[in-house]
Amino acid sequence: MSGWNGVQRVVPSRMSRRPSVLGSVTAVVPVPFDRIRPLMTAQTAHVLLGLDRGAATTVSVDVDPTTDTLGLQGQFWYRGEYTFTAHPRGTEIAYRIKNVSGQPDVIIRLWQRRILRRQQHDLDALAAALPARLP
């Protein structure tokens, strides 16, 4: 206790740190943003993300209308964020994968390297299929 004068040292938990971005990619879909924006609701986000309605039991989806971002969270470590913005050729989708586990990024990168390697491919597939899913 010498030197501390009875004060306890508080060490912040790793679980309290902010989620970190592990990867970020973009793609452009040839659909005007004004056709996409009305679907940015909790009820219709599955259409934009290409999710089966049954996925609602294993992942949670949230919507931030102020940033035109859909969040998809599942497993203990994963959060995907899809931000939609107007683009001269239609709509740009930015897809970020975040580590929300509190575990060191290096561990999650190693453990989930296949998902991270496929990030651009997966976003390109989502963008290619999106026009056919729109009402």
Image (cartoon, rainbow, N blue to C red):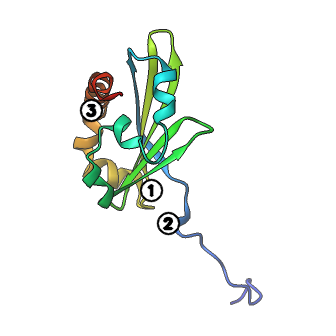
- Determine whether label 2 and label 1 are within 8 Å by CB: no
Q: Is residue 121 left or right of residue 70?
A: left
Mark 1 vs 3, N-terminal side: 1
Query: SS of the residue at dot 1?
Result: loop
**Residue 63, image x and y in percent?**
51, 45
Q: Rounded to the nearest whole Å, what is the CA distance between mark 2 and mark 1?
A: 8 Å
Q: Earlier in the sequence, mark 2 or mark 1?
A: 2
Q: Is residue 95 left or right of residue 86?
A: left
Q: Could you say where residue 51 lies in the image, as x and y percent from the top left?
A: 29, 43
Mark 1 closeness class: few <14, some 14–19, many ≥20 residues within 10 Å? many
Cα–Cα span, label 2 and label 3: 28 Å
Instruction: Name the spot of residue 114 as percent of width and height, x first.
Output: 22, 42
What kind of residue is marked 1? Answer: Val
49 above or below 106? above
Quote the CA–CA distance across marks 1 and 3: 20 Å
Q: Residue furthest front?
A: 135
Residue at the (51%, 38%) spot, across then down: 69
**Who's the residue at 38% across and 14% down the image?**
30
Residue receiving disc 1: 100
Q: Nearer the viewer, residue 117 or 56?
A: 56
Looking at the rendered structure, the kind of residue marked 3 is Asp
Counting every numbered tag in the picture gives: 3
Element under disc 3 = helix
Residue at (73%, 84%) from the top-left corner? 4
Which residue is found at the position 52% from the left and 24% from the top? 85
Locate the C terminus by quadrant: top left
Dot placed on the residue nearer the N-terminal end, 2 or 3: 2
Q: Residue furthest right?
A: 5
Mark 3, other Cα within 10 Å: few <14 / some 14–19 / many ≥20: some
Front residue of this view, candidates 118 and 7: 118
Label 3 sits on residue: 122
Question: Which residue carries the number 2 mark?
Answer: 15
